Amino acid sequence: MNWSEKQILSYAQATHRYNIWCGSVSAGKTFSCNHKFIERLKNGPKGDVMVIGVSRPTIQRNVLNDLYQILGFPPPTTKTNEAKLYGHNVYFVGAPDESAMRVIQGSTLALAYVDEAACIPYPFWRMLESRLRVPGAQLLATCNPEGPAHWLKKEFIDRAGDLDLISFNFTLDDNPSLDPAYKESIKKSYSGMWYKRYILGEWAAAHGLVYDSFDHLNLYDTPFPAAPTYVVGMDYGTTNATAGVLLAINPRQWPQIRVEEEFYYDSVKVGRSKTDAELADDVKDWLKYKQLAAIYIDPAAASFKLALRHLDLPVVDAVNDVLLGVKHTSKFMQQKNLVIHKSCSTLIEQIQSYSWDQKAADKGEDKPSKVNDHLCDALRYGIASAFPQGEISSLDDNITIEQIKRQMYADHAPLSPFMGGGTGGYF
């Protein structure tokens, strides 16, 4: 791979205690950081080393696979939590929350590599600082920008002059290996705040509408053939509304995700609360005879999950990462790969008013306002759980979705039925 000027410069100048590669997605940050990490393993001080990420699987996906390709030998399995590299004990540590601090207490480190640094809990980061106790120890980190009030920007990047710290800002153009068509595809995947952060590399504030790309192209009323797979996203409420969305999914048809129906029971408006058993019966009647792959529901809805399972419905705990769900839903919405039937009036109304919480943004947090949002929660449960990586693969690897789209749009034809055969592993 040819190196860009920014990659060469960051590699050469990453000689400080804190070295942070920040910027847009697919900008070549990790490539440069990986090479610097290897150089420090070879030439840095002796001692233990840590590679840290949000979870062990993300460390594998974001760092180790590429790192070991550079080294020229197979990466460890995802069940491996330590390795030996250039005489160092290298530990792989997931830090999803503050409890991970216990894992590194008592450590003495010569080098640390932090992936997705802006997603690491602040107390964990401060503990990690205190563990870099070997003389000449360094921290290397990569991240995508968050809000301008985020602790990593306010307390570290903005204070580079007071700290032994250097940061590098990357954009898509700093990655010479990207095909121009691929760059354009990435740019079209994001809008609003996400575009500023993930394409322009800016520390942009979360404000205004969450789904600012939602428009008439995300609506449909033309009948589609039955999809090969259906899933449900569901938000459960006792004093609040219980809400659900029925998602039809077909990797071989564009758009690949469509919301066919909504379920909404608001006991406050109706004036009567229902038992879990009554709500479960209502859900089963709503679904009729649809063959479901899963009903993704808030993991905290224990009693309602039991009632649904009693009716032999395929209940699965949803991925309840709000920002992940919003990000993936926003991406599909921006691409017009997620469409909603016009009869889903309550969902449409909620999407059109779903906004970022300004008070949270002022504290450096990205949170949607908890107002009239139950169907939006149900939608992100379904999207984040069915597509945890925010991607949908074709059933046939020899047929790309771009080829499918071109065929469907040829001669201004209406969207065609799905192109043949079966279902497959696309979750």
Image (cartoon, grey):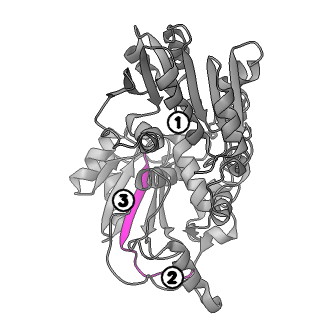
Q: Are marks 1 and 2 in contact (CB under 8 Å)?
A: no
Please name whichever residue, 77 or 315, is drawn nearer the observer in this view of the structure. 77
Q: Nearer the viewer, mark 3 or mark 1?
A: 1
Q: Which residue is mark 1?
A: 34
Q: Residues within 10 Å of mark 1 (few under 14, many from 20)?
A: many
Q: Disc 2 residue type?
A: Pro
Which amino acid, by three-letter code, is at mark 1?
Asn
Residue at left offset 48%, top offset 55%:
383
Instruction: Tell which tag, 1 or 2, sits nearer the viewer.
Output: 1
Count of all numbered marks drawn on residues in the image: 3
77 or 356, which lies in front? 77
Q: Which mark is residue 387?
A: none
Q: Earlier in the sequence, mark 3 or mark 1?
A: 1
Find residue 342 and report its horizontal and vertical position in percent.
59, 71
Residue 155 picture quarter: top right
Tell me if I can see residue 95 in this picture: no
Horizontal side of residue 67 vs 173, given as left or right: left
Three-letter code for the amino acid on which mark 3 is drawn:
Val
The residue where tag 2 is placed is 223
* Left or right: 240 in relation to 410: left
User: Tag 1, which secondary structure?
Assistant: helix
Find out whether residue 362 is within the magenta segment.
no
Q: CA distance from mark 2 to mark 3?
A: 23 Å
Whole-percent x, y for residue 47 in the image: 42, 14
Magenta residues?
222-236
Residue name at image x 67 percent, y 33 percent: 10
Image quadrant in which you'd find residue 185: bottom right
> In the displayed structure, would residue 405 be above or below residue 239?
below
Residue 163 seen by the camera: yes
When the figure is inspected, residue 130 is found, relative to residue 421, above or below; the finding is above
Instruction: Provide the secondary structure element on which disc 3 rests.
Output: helix
Q: Residue furthest front?
A: 43
